């Protein structure tokens, strides 16, 4: 005889246990089969939790979706609280991963699309799950179904519940959750990215000997990329794992659409190898806490530390020629007989110019100072800034120009003036790579005009490829040639606009043509014709631009009337740390980044 729960239910076999309680199979008085999650007693003893439990009953019972484990009832009886849910007997995603080790990329995309679809329904209901992980995804045959979203909402009001969620799942916790910041739906998207990563290679991206180390890695490390993950799937995972919530995809619905497209495109990709540990994570150096993810802020370089002087032996008091870095150098070590240098002598028992205690001697001891004298400019391109500065005289006036670059290491010299081998005077200019602070344009509120939802554009893609962070034309084009305009106040805070322009593959008319024009403070930065079936990559210089205007107009004739979308895919603004406005909101212009030594 099973255990009675309230007046309607009877509990049967124990199915499993988790951090929040135990799950039983059982039936109602009509014989219908359900799963019953009996929550831990310490939660039931918490008045905050019990109050939320009652408050959320109607919301959770009305929440339905193809990829959700439906909640049918919430029962409180004495010291017992239970959630009555769909009975799913296919095991969890964790069970599937344990059996298979890794999952085919196409299946990863399909399962991920299902989880994202479930999160979309949860988020629309005003719920942040906070505990997305393989254990909370049940497999109904091949269909993933997200569970425990009700528990997450209710425990969010309970100190006991919040601590349990965080302590129990450090491998899947978004950086802002670990830091105690506001929790938004973007935190669930980060956790989804961790799940997708794990499905591809069998391990989560951040490992550590303690919970603290793992949580620290979430905030300070970028994930290493395992072999075998297709580029398009890795792009989605990387986007989900952005450190700044604002830089992640704007909605779970968008992620689901992109992953569904990839599920078909990746059918020929083989399964990846199961790893014992993740690839080495990449350290990130954070500056101000107002930047987007995957940013390395400029920090003190080796060149800012004065090298210690080394005394040369007396035999090196003659000029020694060094051939280094493709330039001619003269290392001049002068004795006290050189009137143009600092003279230093040693007296018995005295202290020499370098601070070293001298010994008694009947003769003066010559000491040396050293400096680099250039006969021609060395080749500094490709070197780190600190290394480059060490190859130049300390007295040289060096101007540093920082340039946003996505494909070069932080601090690498990109160009120089004068060029290598050219004569030099007392000044030089070095252009140095700096990693981009990324702000996606769909997260920035236009100053005028507006875009549409972009749902059709995301699902269809352009030239066979889906794009996250898409911006689609606000009105579907019929027989109109009206000029469409969207403007942004970028406040001189960005260096580049990078995007891909095109027309959706689902457009009704393949003869569709659009003329795209982009202006900065009234000055035309580019003008491109856009046609169906092709995409146009754009990389626009926004240095010192205050007002960005994007406008487009149909140039094809009226026979192209129909349901068509013009799209900017993966549109992003790139800037430098310290210049980019906080959270994409325009700020006052900052001072120039040019520095001199």
Image: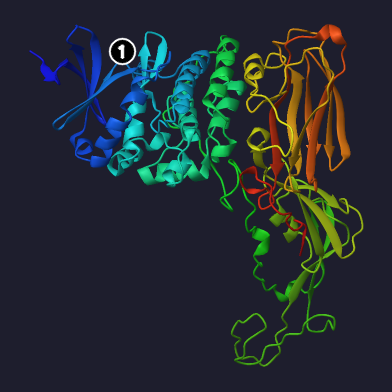
In the image shown, does 476 or 350 lie closer to the viewer? 476
Q: Is residue 263 left or right of residue 542?
A: left
Quarter that holds the N terminus: top left
Q: Between 163 and 211, which is closer to the camera in this rendering?
A: 163
Display colour scheme: rainbow
Quick one: quadrant of the C terminus? bottom right
Residue 391's place in the image compared with 67, above or below, is below
Identify the residue shown where x is 53% and y is 28%: 226
Question: Can you see residue 406?
Answer: no
The residue identified by callout 1 is: 88
Visible residue check, residue 573: yes
Q: Is residue 30 left or right of residue 218?
A: left
Q: Position of residue 47 (x, y in %)?
A: 23, 41
Residue 107 image point, x, y percent: 49, 13
Point 59% across, 36% down: residue: 247
The quadrant in which residue 461 appears is: top right
Q: Is residue 534 above or below residue 53?
A: above
Q: Is residue 306 left or right of residue 228?
A: right
Residue sitting farthest toward the left: 1
Q: Is residue 188 above or below residue 504?
A: below
SS at mark 1? loop
Q: Of residues 147 and 435, which is closer to you in this image?
A: 147
- Residue 241 lies, in percent from the top left, at 53, 34
Number of numbered markers: 1
In this picture, residue 586 sits left or right of residue 19: right
């Amino acid at each position: 005889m099973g255990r009675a729960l309230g007046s309607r239910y009877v509990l049967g076999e124990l199915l499993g246990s988790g951090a929040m309680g135990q799950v039983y199979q059982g039936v109602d008085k009509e014989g219908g089969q359900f799963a019953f999650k009996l929550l831990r007693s310490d939660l039931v003893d918490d008045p905050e939790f019990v109050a939320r439990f009652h408050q959320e009953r109607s919301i959770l019972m009305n929440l339905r979706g193809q990829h959700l484990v439906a909640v049918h009832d919430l029962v409180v009886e004495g010291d017992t609280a239970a959630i009555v849910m769909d009975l799913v007997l296919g095991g969890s995603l964790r069970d599937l991963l344990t059996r298979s080790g890794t999952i085919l990329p196409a299946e990863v995309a399909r399962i991920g699309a299902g989880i994202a679809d479930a999160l979309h329904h949860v988020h629309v209901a005003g719920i942040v799950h906070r505990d997305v992980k393989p254990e909370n995804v049940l497999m109904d045959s091949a269909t993933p179904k997200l569970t425990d979203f009700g528990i997450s909402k209710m425990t969010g009001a309970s100190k006991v519940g919040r601590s349990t969620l965080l302590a129990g799942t450090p491998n899947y916790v978004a950086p802002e959750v670990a830091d105690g910041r506001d929790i938004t739906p973007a935190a669930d998207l980060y956790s989804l990215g961790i799940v997708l990563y794990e499905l591809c290679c069998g391990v989560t991206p951040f490992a550590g000997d303690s919970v603290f180390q793992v949580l620290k890695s979430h905030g300070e490390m970028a994930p290493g990329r395992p072999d075998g993950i297709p580029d398009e799937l890795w792009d989605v995972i990387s986007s989900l794992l952005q450190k700044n919530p604002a830089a992640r995809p704007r909605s779970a619905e968008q992620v689901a659409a992109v992953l569904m497209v990839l599920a078909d495109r990746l059918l020929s990709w083989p399964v990846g190898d199961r790893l014992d540990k993740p690839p080495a994570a990449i350290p990130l150096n954070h500056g101000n806490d107002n930047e987007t993810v995957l940013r390395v802020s400029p920090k003190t370089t080796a060149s800012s530390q004065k090298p210690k002087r080394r005394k040369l032996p007396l035999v090196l008091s003659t000029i020694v020629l060094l051939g280094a870095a493709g330039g001619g150098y003269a290392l001049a070590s002068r004795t006290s007989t050189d009137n143009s240098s600092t003279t230093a002598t040693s007296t018995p028992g005295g202290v020499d110019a370098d601070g070293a205690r001298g010994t008694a001697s009947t003769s003066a001891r010559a000491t040396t100072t050293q400096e680099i004298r250039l006969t021609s400019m060395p080749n500094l391109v490709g070197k780190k800034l600190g290394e480059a500065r060490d190859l130049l005289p300390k007295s040289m006036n060096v101007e540093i120009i920082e340039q946003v670059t996505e494909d070069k290491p932080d601090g690498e010299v990109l160009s120089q003036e004068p060029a290598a081998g050219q004569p030099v005077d007392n000044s030089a200019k070095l252009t140095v790579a700096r990693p981009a602070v990324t702000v996606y344009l769909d997260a920035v509120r236009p100053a005028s005009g507006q875009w549409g939802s972009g749902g059709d554009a995301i699902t269809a893609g352009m030239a066979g490829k889906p794009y996250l962070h898409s911006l689609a034309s606000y009105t579907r084009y019929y027989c109109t040639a009206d000029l469409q305009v969207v403007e942004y106040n970028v406040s001189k805070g960005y260096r580049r606009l990078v995007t891909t322009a095109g027309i959706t593959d689902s457009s009704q008319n393949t003869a569709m043509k659009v003329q795209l024009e982009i202006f900065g403070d009234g000055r035309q930065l580019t003008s491109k014709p856009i046609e169906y079936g092709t995409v146009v990559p754009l990389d626009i210089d926004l240095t010192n631009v205050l007002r960005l205007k994007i406008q487009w107009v149909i140039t094809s004739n009226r026979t192209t009337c129909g349901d068509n979308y013009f799209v900017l895919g993966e549109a992003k603004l790139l800037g430098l740390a310290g210049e980019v406005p906080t959270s994409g909101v325009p700020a006052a212009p900052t001072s120039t980044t040019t520095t001199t030594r």
